[in-house]
Amino acid sequence: MSYFNGTLLLLKEKKDPKLFILDFNEKLKSINVLLQKSDSEIVVFNDSRNEEEKEPIWLDKLMTDEDVINLVYSWKGLGLLTYRHPDFKFEMYINYLTWDDKYVDGFKVSFARKDTVFEDDRHKELIAKISKFVDYEYVVGDVNEESQNYISMEESLDEIKQHILKNSFEIDSRTW
């Protein structure tokens, strides 16, 4: 299993999933972060808050960005999409998150550890660019399971915010 370096971006205000993800995807394109669409890519869906599950869906290379994004925002738990950026060898992932199954509350950007360890700060620089596209409350990373400051996305949003307030992180918007 691979180790990923994940950065959580929590929004100041809840956003409509369709409008937010479509607009955000267009902004990502402006910095060469491109949605991956091929026969070997899938959309992974998050469980809903009442733990309903949705099976992953295989993509088709003929799908448009809007087709793929529609899959994510049409599911109440939202989900994870694969992106590529020319500065990184491996894919990056953006997991669109909700804590009420209605609105986007934030998202987590994850990079393969092989693209972030023993390297320069390219991933931090890209996170800084991405953060300029949203009105965020917090940007914190590294928060994946292997991190000493792991944040479980299963916790309530209030618990996550309390965890953020009590810890410092490799990437931390409070120090910018």
Image (tube, rainbow, N blue to C red):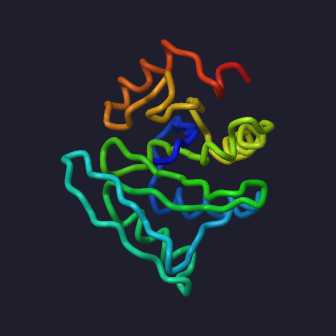
- Residue 110 drawn at (x, y percent): 56, 46
User: Is 174 positioned to the left or the right of 2 in the image?
Assistant: right
Name which quarter of the figure residue 85 lies in.
bottom right
- Residue 50 drawn at (x, y percent): 19, 47
- Viewer-proximal residue, 41 or 135? 41
- Residue at 32% across, 36% down: 154
Asked if 31 appears above or below 119 in the picture, the reply is: below
Identify the residue at the far top of this view: 166
- Residue at 71% across, 42% down: 123
Identify the residue at the far front of this view: 1
- Viewer-proximal residue, 55 or 1? 1
- Residue 56 drawn at (x, y percent): 35, 67
- Residue at 55% across, 43% down: 4
Asked if 53 appears above or below 67 in the picture, the reply is: above
User: Is 58 positioned to the left or the right of 129 in the image?
Assistant: left
User: Is 3 positioned to the left or the right of 111 in the image?
Assistant: left
- Residue at 67% across, 41% down: 131
- Residue 59 drawn at (x, y percent): 46, 77
Asked if 49 appears above or below 91 in the picture, the reply is: above
- In the picture, which quadrant includes the C terminus? top right
Circle count = 0
